[in-house]
Image: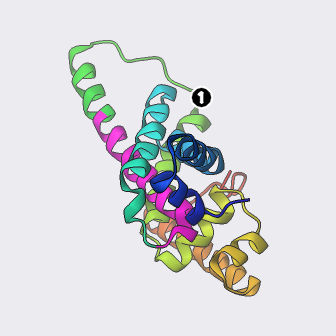
Amino acid sequence: MLTNDQLIELFLNGESGDAASAFETLVKRYGPMVLGVCRQILNHHQDAEDAFQATFLSLARKAGTIRDRRVLGCWLYQVAYRIAKRARARTARKRMRQEARDVEAPAGEPEDAVAWNEFRPVLHAEVHRLPAKYRTPVVHCHLEGKTIEEAARLLQIPIGTVKGRLSRARDLLRARLIRRDRAPDQRVGLWG
């Protein structure tokens, strides 16, 4: 299996077939995580798809500027987060203009689904604010689905350090969410 560094080098310097194949491999490797972040921040499927595509378009444009390619997943997470947040803000402004024109309120969703849909962007905002040493293991383990051992190997740090950072990250997130009066429901947990 090729490393992120090797894939990006192939994408940047390989022949067209190799470059396309390398980029496709990166999309397959990180696509589920990026799409998941976009879907969790954006409630509309098409908006999430657009943010997903914009994230990988950004990778295609800026691949040569990424310094530490071992943590490409974190770079993609941050790009996806920012793009999705901007899209969510645009959608909210558009919806407010539309609602100002409409007299009738739209039909609502079940209460729990609405609460969760409102909570997820707040959670991602707080993950985004975490110091990199805590955010990186969260992205790898909770968003990319890597095991603690895989994250430790990728980050080149001991397994115990990854476990400790994940624990500290969850504590920080919990405290921040409580301060924002957005404590996670115990049934769902932070990553439900």
Comparing 15 with 171, the one in front is: 15
Comparing 2 with 115, the one in front is: 2
- Residue 163 in view, yes or no: yes
Residue found 67% across the figure and 73% down from its top: 154
Q: Which residues are magenta?
A: 68-90
* Disc 1: which residue: 110
Determine whether the residue tagged by mark 1 lies in a helix, strand or loop.
loop
Residue found 42% across the figure and 57% down from its top: 63
Residue found 62% across the figure and 71% down from its top: 137
Is 39 magenta? The answer is: no
Q: Main secondary structure of the magenta part?
A: helix
Quadrant of the drawing holding the N terminus: bottom right
Residue type pointed to by label 1: Pro
- Residue 174 in view, yes or no: no
Comparing 42 with 21, the one in front is: 21
Percent coordinates x, y for residue 25 in the rendering: 63, 47
